[in-house]
Image (tube, coloured by chain):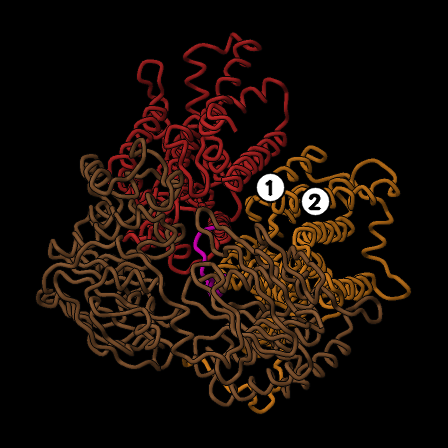
Chain colours: A orange, B brown, C red
Amino acid sequence: MTDTASATSHPRRPNRWLGKHSRQGNWLAALIIIVATTLLLLVTTDDFATPQNASNLLAQAMPLIIVAIGQMIVIVLAGMDLSVGSVMSLTTAILALDGSPIVLIPLVFLAAMSIGLVNGIAIVQLNVHPIIATLSTQFIVLGVAQLLRPVAGGSVPDIVVSMVTGSVLGIPAPVFWAVVIVAVGWKILHGSRFGLHLLAIGGGAASGQTDTAHNFGLNDGRNIVLAYVLSALFAALAGFFIAGRIASGDPGVGAQFALDSITAVAIGGTQLSGGIGGLHGTILGAVLMALLANGMNLANMSAFLQGAIKGVILLLVVALQSRKKMGL
Amino acid sequence: MPPAVTMTGVTKQFGSTIAVNDVSFEIQPGRVHALMGENGAGKSTLMKILAGVNQPDAGEIALAGRPVTFSDPRDALAAGVSTVFQELSLLPNLTIAENMFLGKEPLGRFGAPDRATMTRRTQEALAELGMRLDPKLLVSELSIAERQFVEIAHGLKADAQVFILDEPTAALNAADVEVLNAQISKLKAAGKAVIYISHRMDEIFSICDDVTVMKDGGHVVTQPLSELTPEKLIALMVGRELGDLFPTRSNEPGPPMMSCKDLRVLSGTKPLNFDLHRGEILGFAGLEGQGQSQIVRSLFGQIPAARGQVQIGAETINLPMSQQSGIRFMQALRVGFVPEDRKEEGLLLGAPISENIGIGLQAARPGFKPILRIREIVMRIMSELNVKAQSPSLSARALSGGNQQKVLLGRYLASGMDILIIEEPTRGVDIGAKAEIYKLLRNLADQGKALIVLSRETVELIGLCDRILVVHGCDFVAEMSGKDATEQEILNAALTT
Amino acid sequence: MTPILRSAAKVPPAYFVFVALLATLWITKPQLMNLNVMGIFVRQVAPLGILVLGQLLVMRVRSIDLSGAGVLLLVNYLIASGLLGGLPLPLVLLMCLGIGGLVGLFNGYLVAKRRVSAVIATLAVTVIITGFVQFLASGKPPGNMPDIMNDIYKVKWGPVPLPVVLWVTLTAVMSVFLSRFVFGKFVLAVGENPTASHFSGVPVERTVLIAHVLAGFFAGVAALVQSASVAVGSLRLGLEMPIDAVAATILGGVVFGRGDGGVWGPFFGVMCFAFLFVVMTSFGVPEPGKQIARGLIILLAAVFYGLSTRNS
């Protein structure tokens, strides 16, 4: 055997943040592109470095950051959630119904929770491939959203608008919520047993040791269902944010977010095969996507072409991540 | 003091094969207990039962006199049985400390896993083994030896009383073996029981106090090693009788049909040279996992690191071949490979028997050509091989192991291969079908074909083959003729290198 | 399961659903039950039916193709925009088929060689093409279809419209191709077990690649028929078509790796869609109800197969 190494070799320092063995994945590329893009925009445009644009940028990035954190929770355990975009659309549609916010706001999260449960149970109990399960709920949920609100319109309760666009404790609302949501995401992914178990399950799936996590006594089924519920809840939160910004309901508003969130997660260094990834990478990925959109807007690029470019980025990122399995 | 482990009538059956049959013996605390036996003797299954991976069909296990039942490995660890398996049982994307505490993480402030405590206690457990690894290293960064020490540390931390070491030295260099031996002595001194499985005879005699020998799933003997010599031990392990099953060998083999020159399976292994002659059945013997399978798979492009040359007829092939098309390329040269894992690599279980037999013939044709009419061929093969099935449209899944194996072999018969390379021709096959398969293989050789056969069952190779090469560490360590070979001789060659 | 139930489970759900839908229509709307009206219903789903021929192929080799939406949009745009106005029509049609095949080749390369998730790859391809076409068109509807295409579309053979004839012919060709040609055996083997196929000498990657190329080609044909059916080009073609194709395929008893329903199962899956939307419309179910139906069909069928593969 050639694979021998001395167990008594000199102690090594762990590379926790970077390098081939980092569990955070390769997030440095995203950071470098962000810095480069920022520099480029600073030099080439006058409008980039304005307070107005900065607040626009954050407001634009927020929904994607939120939904990408949820997406990351399921990707880390080697799953995927294509229904997040529809959940966002449904959220805006529910919030734009006639009714008291005391009813509508809990209803939004109740709906998201049930969608997550359906996804999780279909995957865990009924043995459906995650992509197929969430692809079908994507359409079911979209249909419900269109039933509630066939075309964009209506108005959301004032409290939703002020929570998102006003200020909280003297801090601009987007900044306040960004801090809160990132803290919550950090707690789930890196500050809890649940987060560690997600990594364990995903790592087992990625290395073909599907029973290993189970052998450690982890309840993988329950963790997976919970992950899909969380993913749907984060999507609802992102929808809530958008509803506050556009102050109305729109069944088409979430359409692009399923793929955009996957792109953001993947570009942030998280492996789509599971087990590797860090929250900061996902946030960088989402910021990068928002920054590119912002830059392309400033350069007056057609929205349609922007869509095509995002598709190219997604293809590049997934084609560069190797996996063994062929197919879905 | 009660025995650390007491096994009473432990039995485990997989399908129609009895892997462990009514085994009873005791393991004493403070002693190192060797578990010996040939491939397939049931050692691994017995240890998996003790480790909670498998559940026994009958019998009882007691730890320190208390009866126990385990539903999974975690149960076993909680009850004080720690296992270092050859297979991976650590998660590569977690740190050492996380692996140590997975499922039982101590919680710190705000309900987060208390990483400081995890790191400290992992450090302590590693220090007990004299290891200076940083607990924050990912397991994927560790060498195989280091992973094994981490698993031992895992057991120490869980305060295990019984340690199972399944071939722990297979991947270790001399210095690490020293360290491991020192650890085993420490465990022994601390009154723990250590079960040690190894194929290195010298190790067994230098480390172990007692030995249990298993054969064919049954218990042969348990006694102190001081009463035995290596020769006596091997004699206890061998002695299986399968004599009548084998057809008589025929004449002298003809000229070489395939020659391998300077075949290196992995970059560090020795170059191999061997010929395969017309009319010959060549056996690759050896202990499990010594590279027999890698050698033959490298001939089909399935081992990308392989280097060397293969000469078949006028064709000279430089290794490695393309992994994607190696199998097809060799089939075009009429060289077939029958993989060991029937269910995963061999058969299309959900497809009819006729498709399973015919796919080799069809695969030899371009995709846009009409399919061959193979009904007659399939019927002929099925009757030649005596496949017991109502109709060729029955799915392969519905067949018994023996009939499945015949269908798989039938595929290569149908496509008319000149050279057949077969891994485990009779794995999971009942005794009647075994005899039929042996006869079939001998007939093929008599027809002027050439075969390489790999088997865990040394007796099978002795009975079947004209010539046997003993493989150890991807290298040939002995060559003998099938007529003269004895089990003892082969085991000796495989064990003492 | 009793043997009778087990063999009933092998019959694609599409046949039962088809009979149920036909009966529903016959009872509630007897006036629709004449050949001319039926012909028009069936003609509407001919593009879907042709798209399904490719979808069933890729699904049988455990992949999926959602790029049909992009091909449809691109072909639709190329013809309606007059961008290729100077070229003779047959050449334009050939180019459209070629575009479909190229997109399929690209998908196949990503899925078979690069091992990219098929859903992600083909969705991304759709996103890219859609963005690109809308950019070219600046979001405006591109213009009129050549009259000759619409005229051909309206040709009938007795009561049977020409697009339906094309669809049935292609289905029959596909059926013969899969059952009488070696490639059909490759598809069967790869779907059943890619590893065992590899070891028995089946060119696994090539089979998946060719399946994707053919799927792209069928998407090109479907796009031509779809373009001929409308007088004016449109940029509002969504993901519905490929998703319906997935649903019809599963309904027809073909699911990832398994082809119990053959080619005619999915054919009737498409027929179900023809009548499902008629029945839904006649019961006053609004458009979003169809979205929900799509999702539910895929989910229920996937659950059905998920449970049956777990038990075996």
**What residue is drawn where x is 29% and y is 73%?**
B470
Q: Residue B279 at x, y = what percent? A: 13, 60
Mark 1 crowd level (few <14, some 14–19, many ≥20, 10 Å Cα): some
Question: From the viewer's perspective, is residue B409 above or below residue B388?
Answer: below
**What residue is drawn where x is 41% and y is 81%?**
A2
Horizontal side, residue B441 vs residue C30: left or right: left
Which chain letter goes with mark 1?
A
Residue range in magenta is: A318-328
Q: What is the quadrant of residue B295 in the picture?
A: bottom left
The residue singled out by tag 2 in the image is A117
Which quadrant of the figure contains the C terminus of chain B?
bottom left
Q: Residue B390 at x, y = what percent? A: 31, 31
Horizontal side, residue B40 vs residue B92: left or right: left
**What residue is drawn where x is 79% and y is 68%?**
B112
Q: Amino acid at mark 2?
A: Leu
Task: Determine the residue located farthest toward the right in the rendered image.
Answer: A169
The residue singled out by tag 1 in the image is A126
Task: Determine the residue located farthest toward the bottom in the rendered image.
Answer: A10
Q: What is the quadrant of residue A303 in the picture?
A: bottom right
